[in-house]
Image (spheres, rainbow, N blue to C red):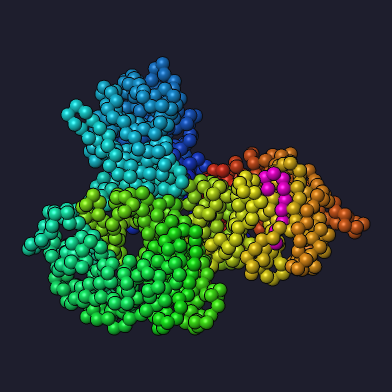
Amino acid sequence: MTGQLQDLSHYGPSLCVKFNKTYTDYIFVAVGPFIQIYRYDTGELINRLRIFKANKVHGFNFSNDGENCVLFGSKSISICSIRELLSSNDISSSENMYTEWIIDSTFSYDSKQLYILTCYNLVLVVDLQGNIVERKNLLNERSILYSGTIKVLSDERVIINAGTVLGGILIWDLYKEEKMHNLTGHDGSIFYVVVSNEGQYVASCSDDRSIRLWDLTSGRELSIGWGHTARIWNLKFFNNDTQLISVSEDCTCRVWNIIKNQDKVELVMANIYETHLIKNVWSVDVLETEGIAATSGNDGRIKLIDLKQTTRFGDEERCFNITSLPSKGELNLQKGEIFKGFHWFDFGLVAITSLGNVLKYSEREMIWELITSDERLASYSITNGVSDATHENNVIVFSNNKCDILMLNFSKDGQVVSCKNLLHIESLSKTCNSMVIAYGPEHCLVAVESPNPRDKFVVLQVKITTLEVVKRFNFLKPEGFVSSCLEVFENSLLIGSRFSTVAIFNLEDDSQKPYLIRRITSGDTTTSIKHVETINGQALFSVTNRDGFYNFIKIDTFALKNLSDDRNDSICLHGIIHSNKVIKGFLEGAFYNSKGDYITYGFKSSLFYMFNEKNGYEIASQVCGGAHRQWKLCSLGENVGFMLVYIKASELFLRKIYTSDIPETLEDAIHGREIRDISILPRRITDKYDPQNGYLFVTGSEDTTIKLCKYDPKDGAITNYWTERKHVSGLQRLSFINDKLMVSCSAREELFLWELNTEFKSNPYMTIRQSLPTLTTHPDLRIMDFDVLFNGSSNNFIISTVYSDSSIKMWYYNYDSNQYQKIWENRYQTCCILNTSFVQLEDQLFLLIAATDGFLSLYNLTNELSFIKNLNNSIELNEDQIKLVQSNKKPQLSLSVHKSGIKTMDVNVTSDNILQVFTGGDDNSIGMTIFKQSDDKKNNFNGKTTSMIENAASSTVTSCQLFNNATNLITTSVDQRVRVWIISSDNKLILKDTKYTTIADTGSCDVVADDDNSQSILLGGVGLSVWKY
């Protein structure tokens, strides 16, 4: 035990991010009261140091030579050198405090003084020791400022840009103390205003979601930029003042071109980047020499954006019109002929037209060539491609709807067609789909389907080098089966179908009926199947669905090999261990990249996207046309990128999406809104997942999502794994109830039981096992809390749920049948119940509740739940006797503890059967109450508050947690103070330690004992911190 609260790491809103023109490899980021410095090109964290004792760093600016920095936040300011920022751990001792809120601060032109703009439109001129030398203000103006910036153009010219709350934008000259302009036109408060680098323009943004460009000299409005869907927070001119970059509450970063046309200046949106989660991007800066932008936001992410993503290498985009293709020789294309299919290989593109002409595009020579023509492939054709492991052989497969297949083998450089094979499948009446996949190092499988349900599902095993068909499989096609994608694993062929179905065919015996996995989710067509890994005979597959669902399914390969034809169709050899849905759009596929990140891709309306699902950000996007688009995504090689081929407006486009050379994020995101609850899995995971030696935990947020993460107790480093989006309202509570089950609850009577799977090395996985039944069609109650009591050593349990309308319900969950059964219900009064807990005292079972009326109430359940047959530190139930008990029984004991709502509660039963209850409330107090059996031993209980610390905090106490074998209590409160209390032998609370946290709206915490006898603490609110005690 260290006996002192120590902060290890903090993840939370970042209000400012900047590059330095002298230290060009570094990027500086304000996170809470800290500055974090990274190498932007590697993502390495160089230093993290505390700037202020408590106040957050709202902004900072560098001197002209880049060697010094002024940092400000609230009423605090600090001046230091870059060398101090790079080498020190704490410079809060040099913090200076002023009497007014600081809006902006920057160095004078010669860097010998500072200008400080306050919220009253007053500028303080101070020396580098922080002493006020002069005060400057605009005479007869005393506006309250919402925002503002100081632009130093020369020794003699300093422009103050003051964004008022309701009075427009005041532009004034610092040294003349004269108003230059009052720019009006925005509706609402001005959130940011900035002068361009050369002093030609003023750009502003406000509540009205517009960006306005003004002429600094005349004050004339030049242009209005519309596009952001929410408030805009920050702007910056770059590229010689020809472009503007903006960030917004809508989580996007947008680039605008400033276009001059004679006497007219226009602000035209050039690009949109999805950068952050849920809400608010606060800051943006641009490293112009490299074409890289950095953004920071409310979710704590530090995002790097390649502004030259489509131009950096010069070959990112190609466009071809079939009527004017650069060619080698005559192409013999006819009027009205169009592209019908294509596939990208290392050497270039192979495509087929509507008249059956097969064309090859050589990327090295940048010309097209006619390879062959076949009228049988005119009008309708399907195109697939596959390469061997060495890419020495590249096979293109064309098929029509009349059972004809044309296969061509191209050499590695694409210059030679090594062999050709034309087949006709006699056994099929017609074909509607064909698919190709590599099968071992020397073969590929060509799957061909007929629309006739009586026809077999034909699969050809083809030798890649000779295109010889070495084996043919004729599989029985399941009823209602329409193929859409395929994957091969060992001797099993997995085929995806409509209605979220997967069929597994045996490549060793085509007479065996397939194993079916039906209705994986409620969505439609299965769009991709990818093998992930195999451990102990359990094969894991990623399966995606066009309606946006992705699932991880484990399959027992041992049992699969031993399936018999006379098996019962109800036999189950698979399990869904993870299920989720993408944020928006249609999902066409997903895969793990070389970094272990799960990448999804698909379409949002006409926009193609690639998305990092693990860390929650968009990798790339491209406008690709409407619903009947033709497209294909092909790999350029590991760690190289992807080629997106698509047709838009009858033109063929090639778009290379390169893997970024720089980190896409320097810090990964937490939730975009405040964290409502945290739960740590006490069992340490040491043999898999980064960090190797750490604890899994879950967080539930106001943004309705649950995150599954892991943290390292040594340095507090946090790794995200998944963001679950099943809830539709803000989370209320969540908790691990054993090593593999977790429960979460929220509004709309949502309570989900989740199952955790840690058997695979790729990631931990988590999926909903069951949801609690709702009693109405349109549930509107909030489940405020729950508690669980297990039935012996099984995974069956009783769960109590308390609701916002004062009702209490109790359910029995059977793990094997995966069903809830309501067994008890009651109503407390008319107020909202905030907390609940099961309590076992001697041979009796109680339910304890805490409500908004400030009372603790104890219900005796022993006699009412007659099917409980044993109480000895756990319960056992006679399941056959379980029935619903409609109770109107009043609490056996109610005790007034707080003057208002009891926000948090934790309990402990001592060895001598005394119930200790620890509470924190809206009245800012912390209490300790004990319940014990009366001396007459007649099932009567007495309760009394033994310790009540009034005004224990200066605002609501939001959470309390027992730790260290119930000898200590940790509490959090809205005043951002974390307190540790000793529980004395006479049942009193004694304050032992207190520490300020930078997390606003501090609302949740969890504690776990670590190996070194210390305690790991997670704190949540608007941000997430890892502490040690």
Q: Position of residue 115 (x, y in %)?
A: 37, 31
Determine whether 951 is above or below 694 in the image: above
In depth, the one of 415 and 205 nearer the eye is 415
298 sits left or right of 683 in the view? left
In depth, the one of 281 and 577 nearer the eye is 577
The residue sitting at the left extreme is 329
Snapshot quadrant of residue 339: bottom left
In depth, the one of 95 and 497 nearer the eye is 497
Give the mark count. 0
Q: Is residue 1004 in view? A: no
The residue sitting at the right extreme is 936
Determine whether 947 is above or below 130 in the image: below
Residue at horizontal 29 percent and vertical 77 percent from the top: 426
Q: Position of residue 100 (x, y in %)?
A: 48, 29
Residue at horizontal 20 percent and vertical 32 percent from the top: 260
Determine whether 514 is above or below 158 in the image: below
Residue at horizontal 47 percent and vertical 75 percent from the top: 515
Q: Which residues are magenta?
A: 803-812
Where, quadrant-wise, is the N terminus in this rendering? bottom right
Determine whether 569 is above or below 49 in the image: below
Residue at horizontal 52 percent and vertical 47 percent from the top: 703
Q: Position of residue 849 (x, y in %)?
A: 74, 50
The residue sitting at the top extreme is 140
Q: Position of residue 467 (x, y in %)?
A: 23, 78
Q: Is residue 518 in view? A: yes
907 sits left or right of 500 in the view? right
Magenta-colored segment: predominant secondary structure: strand
Residue 21 in magenta?
no
Where, quadrant-wise, is the C terminus in this rendering? bottom right
Snapshot quadrant of residue 628: bottom left
